[in-house]
Amino acid sequence: EAGVAQSPRYKIIEKRQSVAFWCNPISGHATLYWYQQILGQGPKLLIQFQNNGVVDDSQLPKDRFSAERLKGVDSTLKIQPAKLEDSAVYLCASSLVAGRRTEAFFGQGTRLTVV
Amino acid sequence: DAKTTQPPSMDCAEGRAANLPCNHSTISGNEYVYWYRQIHSQGPQYIIHGLKNNETNEMASLIITEDRKSSTLILPHATLRDTAVYYCIAHNYGQNFVFGPGTRLSVLP
């Protein structure tokens, strides 16, 4: 079974520039998450989708971050404009809601460096 | 905020059992205890989860106390490749996974 695919793997941009990350979840997984992981900390949820609807975006900085999941499959996360404090690893995860088994499968992440 | 507390770091000798504790005294009745680990430069990896009963799979065993206020993840024969950050999460069906800082396990040769 293919895992969660993310691209790019690494990205370096200057502050105030824009950047977009792409995620392809495991086939058939209805739930998709985007997490931000700052160095030395645990991942923090940015947004959770159920199919193409937003379940939780309470921690998404909406003035600069946006995310979409068109057709309930792939997803993109955008930052515009980027700040230095956005330097982090951005993780995408997906889960299959089947009974009580809801473990999330994570991609390798995109490491963003804002200079 | 995470509903679990874990020691920030632990060491374990290679070949010995690694016992990672987790406190979740405010866990609700319908929340499961999930364990993930994160090896350097990788995304978190699911290990095991449970509600009330002890669980075992090919990776680890999970022991949950009867009052459900704490649990222990057991890696029976730790190897160097088990060096990672281990996260204990109280998770409710349909909600997101709330990660704390986890326990950094170092397996020593």
Image (cartoon, coloured by chain):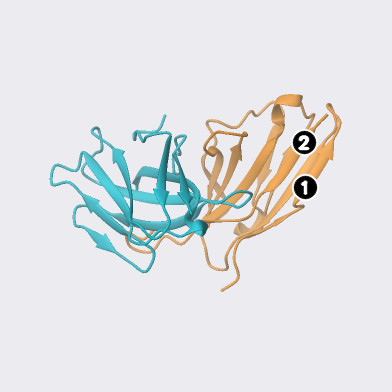
Chain colours: A orange, B cyan
Q: Chain of mark 2?
A: A
Q: Position of residue A3 (x, y in %)?
A: 59, 65
Tell me the crowding category of disc 2: few under 14, some 14 to 19, or many 20 or more residues within 10 angstroms, Cα based: some
What residue is disc 2 on? A113
When the figure is inspected, residue B22 is found, relative to residue A30, above or below; the finding is above
Specify whether A61 is left or right of B78. right
Viewer can see residue A44: yes
Q: Quadrant of the N terminus of chain B?
A: top left
Pointer 1 with pointer 2, Cβ within 8 A: yes
- For the view shown, which residue lies furthest in the left direction? B66
- Residue B49 sits in which quadrant? bottom left
* Residue at 65% over, 43% down: A90
* Residue at 74% over, 54% down: A7
- For the view shown, which residue lies furthest in the front direction? B109
Q: Earlier in the sequence, mark 1 or mark 2?
A: 1
* Residue at 57% over, 68% down: A27
What residue is disc 1 on? A10
Q: Position of residue A20 (x, y in %)?
A: 77, 44
Tell me, yes or no, whether dots 1 and 2 are on the same chain.
yes
- Total residue callouts: 2
